[in-house]
Amino acid sequence: MADALDFDFSSDRNPLFRRLSVSTLLSREESQAISALPVHVKNYKTGQDLAREGDKPTQSCLILEGLACRSKAVENGRRQIFSFHIPGDIPDLQSLYIDYMDHDLVTLTASRVAFIPHASLRELMLNHPRLIGALWRETLIDAAIFREWMVGMGQRSGIARIAHLLCEMIVRLRAIGLMEGLSIRLSITQEQIGDAIGLSPVHVSRVFKELRAKGLIRTDGRTLTIRNWEGLVETGEFDPDYLHLRTAPI
Amino acid sequence: MADALDFDFSSDRNPLFRRLSVSTLLSREESQAISALPVHVKNYKTGQDLAREGDKPTQSCLILEGLACRSKAVENGRRQIFSFHIPGDIPDLQSLYIDYMDHDLVTLTASRVAFIPHASLRELMLNHPRLIGALWRETLIDAAIFREWMVGMGQRSGIARIAHLLCEMIVRLRAIGLMEGLSIRLSITQEQIGDAIGLSPVHVSRVFKELRAKGLIRTDGRTLTIRNWEGLVETGEFDPDYLHLRTAPI
DNA sequence: CGCCTATTTGATCTGATTCAAACAATGTGG
DNA sequence: CCACATTGTTTGAATCAGATCAAATAGGCG
């Protein structure tokens, strides 16, 4: 973006416009209506709550910069992470039609987030019915990703699950221009990866070692570099269709 | 229903009306519009496909009788079941805004299913905007259930997962009047339970033995009887909020 | 009845957890 | 800028939950 401190919400640079454009060809009027949405941008540090279990949000948020996750704490001090959210994602769009949050939404890095009142989104959809489908679809893709994670947790081995998650993050980050060459900045700890796919942090570490040993990836701090994409895809039994992104092959 | 061979789609007996009424108080007009939807009822035997991975459905279906599940086959001959669907459920409502099926929808018992064209549903929502939220919400609850299953697969022990699933089925069946006393007819094989929560059929059997030994349930063929609801809830760490059903306590 | 499909039980094996400790990286205040 | 604290990663050893393999029962049903 032009300026790190401010966002350009004008028509075709608007992050929401860009997001919905992936699936839906938007008209000038629709695009302008989106740009006219009243947004409220806020900065967050690592580990801050964007929404908490039990909240009844009156607005949804759009990640502009940074990384967030949705998670739920469980009895024994454990927690399950349901999804990681990168710029362009609208992680709590569901709150538009589900009264209260049944999970938390937390930043994982310093982040910049735009909030859009539910009332404005509802009005937008009433005036531009095609946007109903475009937004609804976002929540459906969300569910499709959940299903894919369920397949992993239910049926795949540890190494396949991690390889799959890495493939997913690579494809998604690449789609929004956040891959540099063959590297992504994966701002997630191994413990968080474990919370997401149901493995202990210790085992995540061992699996990473194995992925490195097999020559599939290289890690340098939090930077992840692909060494063998085909191999990674095969190991993770990864098929990007469920992301509904329609990107070029790597 | 009055007649086993036919369904009453008139206003307040209409299964879709009843379903949406759980969350939304519907007006007379809305109710009539729902009743006026062109539906096409069809009977199925056990194990038939209602939709297949790769399909591009032009209608959504509503389960009237019987039981269905959504599942996805994986490489090694395994499969993951994502959800079980009981009468009143609209298991493929997502196909309204997601072009192709990324999983299968299959009957698990003889079933009776009503199909509603997507075009009619879209028109219904355009004429009655409040129904947008009512229907969208159904897909969001769907995702909420996925999240809860993810918690189970990622964080809970085998016995907790099965207890949780049993609690879920009990609460859902009870909500539609399919619990008799403290018993439900659970028309699911132990193997299918295993496919749903990521356990081998052998282990499912052992866990059932344990649940019986603990005096939590009784099984008689496919009939499941609650012996200790509190205990079952505690074992499964079950909190029905995620179902968004608002039913009386058992 | 006899076939086919579920469930149960036993024995063995293994992927992943847990506990523990060392090590590396990152951040913080003096 | 260094010393120190904190957080994340790695490695080893012991253990365990659940998988796998194999075979015996038990139910449904044409």
Image (tube, coloured by chain):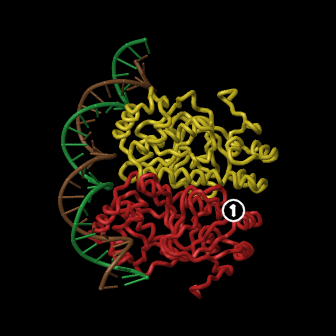
Chain colours: A yellow, B red, C brown, D green
Q: Chain of mark 1?
A: B
The quadrant of the image that shows the N terminus of chain A is top right
Badge 1 element = helix
Residue name at image x 57 percent, y 31 percent: A179
Specify whether residue A42 is in view: no
**Measured along the vertical axis of the image, is residue A88 above or below residue B102?**
above
Q: Residue B134 at what x, y percent from top left?
A: 65, 64
Residue name at image x 59 percent, y 32 percent: A178
Q: Residue D26 at what x, y percent from top left?
A: 28, 77
Specify whether residue B157 is in view: yes
Circle 1: residue type: Ile
**B184 sits to left or right of A49:** left
Residue name at image x 77 percent, y 44 percent: A31
Q: Residue A60 at what x, y percent from top left?
A: 63, 48
**Measured along the vertical axis of the image, is residue B63 above or below residue A146?**
below
The quadrant of the image that shows the C terminus of chain A is top right
Residue B244 lies in quadrant: bottom right
Residue B22 lies in quadrant: bottom right
Q: Residue B95 at what x, y percent from top left?
A: 63, 60
**Measured along the vertical axis of the image, is residue A233 above or below residue C11?**
above
**B184 sits to left or right of A83:** left
Q: Nearer the viewer, residue B76 or A3?
A: B76
Q: Nearer the viewer, residue A99 or B189?
A: B189
Q: Which residue is mark 1?
A: B132
Residue name at image x 76 percent, y 37 percent: A10
